[in-house]
Amino acid sequence: MTARKPKRLWSWLTAIAFGVAFLVFAAGFLYLDERQNAIAAGVQAVPETTVSIPKFKRGVNVSRLQSFAYRDPKRPGKYLWPPFQGELSKVSDAELERLRALGFDFIRLPIDAGVFLAATDSERRILLDDMKSITVRLLDSGFAVMVDIHPATYLTDWTPADILKEAPGPRFQAYADLLEDVAKRIRDLPTDKVALELMNEPQGVCFREDGQDWSVSQKQLYDRVRSVAPDLPIVLTPGCWRSLEGLEYMSLEGYDDKIIVDFHFYEPFYFTHQSLPWVLDPLRYIAGLSYPWTAGNVETAEERTRQHIAALKAADVDVPDYAFDKAMDGVRDYYKRKRPDRAFIESRFDTISQWADKHGIAPDQIVLGEFSAIRPPKGLPDDGSRLAWIKDVRTVVEERGFGWALWDYYEGFGLMTDNVKRTVEPGMVDALGLNANAL
């Protein structure tokens, strides 16, 4: 009897082992079956990884590193090589250190898509290498980076309208190919530091009726990027020049949670773009509008507008006879009807807060990617309205938990008053709530 016990014990142990193995196999089979059913139903049964996306808070557009390219006058639609040249296409380590010390935590990096699309294969590889090198340099300098594919709207065959005109036609497919190339280059960078923006200011209308609307085109571009970069955070945007009105037509159905929503704010446009030579009349002839509206009046704006028109004529600019009268119609509309103030700005940003709540988007996934107002024309006084508007917009954005990026680093709309000396405006630093001790 004693000699038979080990054999019997071995038989029992073998039976138990087979039983355990069977239970493990059965449990695994049931898990896989449930997971397949869940996936078939469009539900992720067990999240395998968590991808962190950037928390863009305080940024500045550095628009001249790979944008504002030099065209080749001898070859229409082509560019000089290198296309980005001159001192404005450079930024020093000291400048980047100053931006970090001021309190900026991210850079929005505009990329002129037309340059890449007009390039030969070998030229495009060089441009893509440069784009990644710049992005890595900004990361190494302590910034997160929003890589903004930013088709130019002038002197190019690749404006947003050109690209989207016959979507999903050949130009659109070429643009999608470019996005895929960019995504492949940056997909290995930290997902909590880098995001790819699909297109800057894609269409002027809120909903396109004469062709494929941006809401459809954007999803197609998103799918192309996702096919090669599953974890790369992607920046989405509405149409309507990226304005708040475009949100009504922007659905998030079919997108994952690795997204950021970017919009722009230049309202009232008659204030932020007054006197600029490239805007439509009568705005190009208006000067002296104040913010808030209570800080000025029709009479002061009339005087500044007369001065501005006189300066244009003295510079041999062709000013039509109707310019002043039409300009004054705009001035009176600004002071008697629009009457913008902080309450106006708050009401406009209520629009995106309500949209975000409706779609379940966290405030830190929303970024005001561009905002600013032009400085007054040379020779006209600055009553502080520009900085007052910028401060109000910035504080309202921050109160809602959104991020922001000033347009842009350079003079005109931007942070600096002198592109040659790279002088930062102290008043702008204050309006943006930045660290004045860094100047």
Image: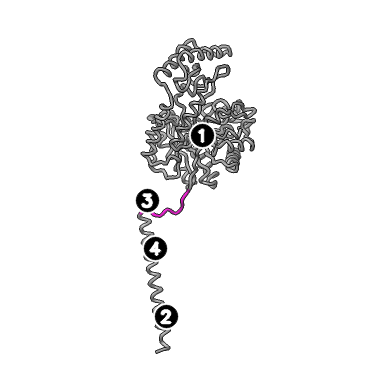
The outermost residue toward the bottom is 1
At mark 1, the secondary structure is strand
Q: Quadrant of the N terminus?
A: bottom left
Magenta-tinted stretch = 38-51
Q: Amino acid at mark 1?
A: Ala
Is 327 part of what is drawn in magenta? no
Q: Which residue is mark 2?
A: 10
Tags 3 and 4 touching, CB below 8 Å: no
Q: Which residue is mark 3?
A: 43
Label 2 and label 1: CA atoms lie apart by 73 Å
Label 3 and label 4: CA atoms lie apart by 19 Å
The x, y position of residue 197, in whole percent, is 49, 38
Q: Is residue 70 above or below residue 45?
A: above
Q: Residue at x 55, y 14 (%)?
A: 312
Q: Amino acid at mark 3?
A: Val
Q: Which residue is mark 1?
A: 405
Q: Is residue 414 above or below residue 308?
A: below
Q: Is residue 92 above or below residue 382?
A: below
Q: Which residue is mark 4?
A: 28
Q: Mark 4 or mark 2, which is nearer the start of the sequence?
A: 2
